[in-house]
Image (tube, rainbow, N blue to C red):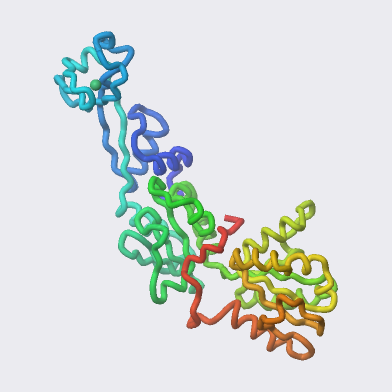
Amino acid sequence: MSELFPRLNWRATRRLLRTGMRVPAGPGVQRETAEVLASLGLVTLEYRRYIRCVHATDEDYWQVTDRNCPGEIEIDDEGPYDCPECGRTIDHPTVHKEVFRDLTTTVQQDGVAEYLYRALQAVETVTKVEPLGYVAVRVTLSDGRSVMLPIVDYAGPGWQAEGADARTSYLYVIASPVNRPAPEYLERAYHKELADILANDKAWLASVLDAVARPRRTAFIGYSPSDAAFVDRLAEDLVANGVGVWLDRWEIKVGDSITDRIREGLLESDYLLVVLSPDSVDSLWLREELNVAGMRQLESQQVVVLPVLYRDCRIPPLLRDKQYADFRGDSYKQGVQDLLAVLAPSAEAALPTPIFWGQRPPRSA
Ligand SMILES: [Zn+2]
């Protein structure tokens, strides 16, 4: 556990960074956490003494005309003070009234960027860290992959890199989710709260970076069990070439509802590869998935359907006008190349926008 990853109370850290602001100034876990965050340069602290215009245990309680006055008056000497809400004058506040203390914390943009910069440099699998202003950090991993970490609060959910950076993977870091973007933006992107990064160690951060940098195009393969041997080979070749593959056999555990898991698998996939053979076109699953309603739903989920013609068969009507990869006879190698041209184009080819909202966070992280 290095200086960068102190043993922070995760709950207090998260709450402090989230709702920031005012915490009790007295001893306790919140104040201790605030002080650690301040020592790391992530927040600034401001102690405040104040009285409440109306407070039941104060000597002047029964003299206050407006007992609903919400006024709070910051004090630094013996007064008198005027209530900013109701305007009444309060004499000798520290003698006759209860004095409250609190601590205001403010998240510091430059501090967060610098902290991230140092935390990432400490990770063994990271070879290069470049700050991009105070809104993002570009990280190069030792195997050459790179990950971009925009800080959501400052970069905004719409922030996108340009040029070469546009082809890297993304991990959004949420520093102080006071300005948290709508959940629908974040639930489909890789994101971590700064509190998570603070509360964990370097190995955790390394595994998060690795997960984010993994290939992000995932193909769900729909097939008939009688074509399983072909599908095994195809799946292995795709994985070897950096395509994420969702195979029911790999992903469905005993006890899972098969239909639910297939739906979930399709939601997490960019492509649906339909392996066409006389056995598969007659299967119930294919007929249900590739009817008009099923196709419309796949389209709305931005799942691209790619027919894979494995054996001669009657091609379902809705797939007839689609370009297919031909695996019949001796054309396996060509078929794989045609698929890879779509699923794993070279770095020069145009990739989708850097943060593709159709993606889900990695399940393991
Ligand atoms: Zn008042």
The image shows residue 162 at horizontal and vertical percentages of: 39, 73
- Name the one closer to the observer, 38 or 14: 14
The image shows residue 274 at horizontal and vertical percentages of: 72, 74
Residue 226 located left or right of residue 183 = right
Ligand 1 sits in quadrant: top left
Residue at 49% over, 79% down: 350
Residue 37 located left or right of residue 254 = left
Residue 192 shows in the view = yes
- Name the one closer to the observer, 61 or 361: 61
Vertical side of 209 occupied by 221: above or below: below
Residue 197 shows in the view = no
Residue at 20% over, 17% down: 93
Q: Quadrant of residue 324?
A: bottom right
Vertical side of 176 occupied by 225: above or below: below
Residue 50 located left or right of residue 30 = left
Residue at 72% over, 86% down: 326
The image shows residue 129 at horizontal and vertical percentages of: 39, 66
How many labels were placed on the picture?
0
The image shows residue 45 at horizontal and vertical percentages of: 29, 39
Residue at 37% over, 28% down: 27
Vertical side of 241 occupied by 51: above or below: above
